[in-house]
Image (tube, grey):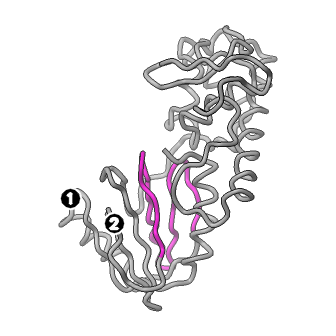
Amino acid sequence: MPELPDLTVFAENLERLVQAKKITVVSYQGKERTILEKELAAGLIAAQIKGVARAGKQICFSLNNGNRLYVHLMLTGGFVVSARPAPAEFAMLTIQFDDDSQMAVTDPKGWAKVALNAGNSSAVDALEVTVDHLVALFAKKPKTLVKALLVDQNLIGGIGNAYADEILWEARISPKSAVGRIPPEVISVLAESIPAVLEKAIACLRERHPGIISGEFREFLAVHNPSCKISPGGSRIIKEQVGGKTTYYTDEQRLY
């Protein structure tokens, strides 16, 4: 599933591709087709795209009529932009522009979600997390495992399974740790590790995969990387289920 670094770069590239374009045709082939297609057409047709940005784990298209289109790619969704109208494989949403170019949201599983003017989440964005945010969240849910808390989009927006593992390895915290047992000095380390890991990944994606608007690229990750058996610190990478999610960690990470 695309996470904060992927989606940040997707949004940057999509903005370059579709900003200022006027929408002329909207076609929706997903679930609730009849209802949602009419709603999307009414909210999008004749509007211009002002900007594209990441919002948590979604992509948000801002329009000059005040509407916002939110796209959640879920597990296997992506975008395809073409210079001319053409059928896109596994297309769920297709948008044509006044210059005849086209953007499609595709998903072979059909799980991607689109919504018009979705409500704003109260979750803090992962790039804006502070020590105070973490202290408050940990106090409310002291028995919660730290990995489960990091990936809870109702609490922190943007972190998924892979980057939670990377952040916890960077902070040397076991994913099995209960947040109520993590000491203050380690919470500070975690608060620093969250943006550090995510911003480093964004930079790697920009350099290694310029122009991406779909897919997942994990070859540069330290531990959440099936091709690696040993961490950069020299420890064996352990793979197991933690809280129902496939998790990668090492014995370099302390259990609290």
Q: Residues within 10 Å of mark 1 (few under 14, many from 20)?
A: few
At mark 2, the secondary structure is loop
* Quadrant of res 100: bottom left
Q: Nearer the viewer, residue 114 or 234?
A: 234
Q: Is residue 125 magenta?
A: no
User: Which image quadrant: the C terminus?
Assistant: top right
Horizontally, is 181 left or right of 119 in the view? Answer: right
Q: Residues within 10 Å of mark 2 (few under 14, many from 20)?
A: few
Residue position for label 2: 89
Horizontally, is 143 left or right of 113 in the view? Answer: right
Q: Main secondary structure of the magenta part?
A: strand
Horizontal and vertical percent position of residue 161:
54, 33
- Residue, far left: 34
Q: Reading the chain from its start, which is encountered first: label 1 or label 2?
A: 1
At mark 1, the secondary structure is loop
Residue at horizontal 44%, vertical 74%?
Answer: 103
Taking 114 as reference, is 179 above or below it? above
Taking 73 as reference, is 233 above or below it? above
Horizontal and vertical percent position of residue 83:
48, 84
Horizontally, is 20 left or right of 221 in the view? Answer: left
Horizontal and vertical percent position of residue 106:
38, 61
User: Which marked residue is nearer to the observer: mark 1 or mark 2?
Assistant: 2
Q: Nearer the viewer, residue 120 or 86?
A: 86
Residue at horizontal 75%, vertical 28%?
Answer: 170
Taking 46 as reference, is 242 above or below it? above
Q: Amino acid at mark 2?
A: Glu
Image mark for residue 32? 1
Q: Amino acid at mark 1?
A: Glu
Image: magenta residue range: 52-81
Residue at horizontal 23%, vertical 56%?
Answer: 31
Q: Is residue 74 magenta?
A: yes
Taking 195 as reference, is 40 above or below it? below
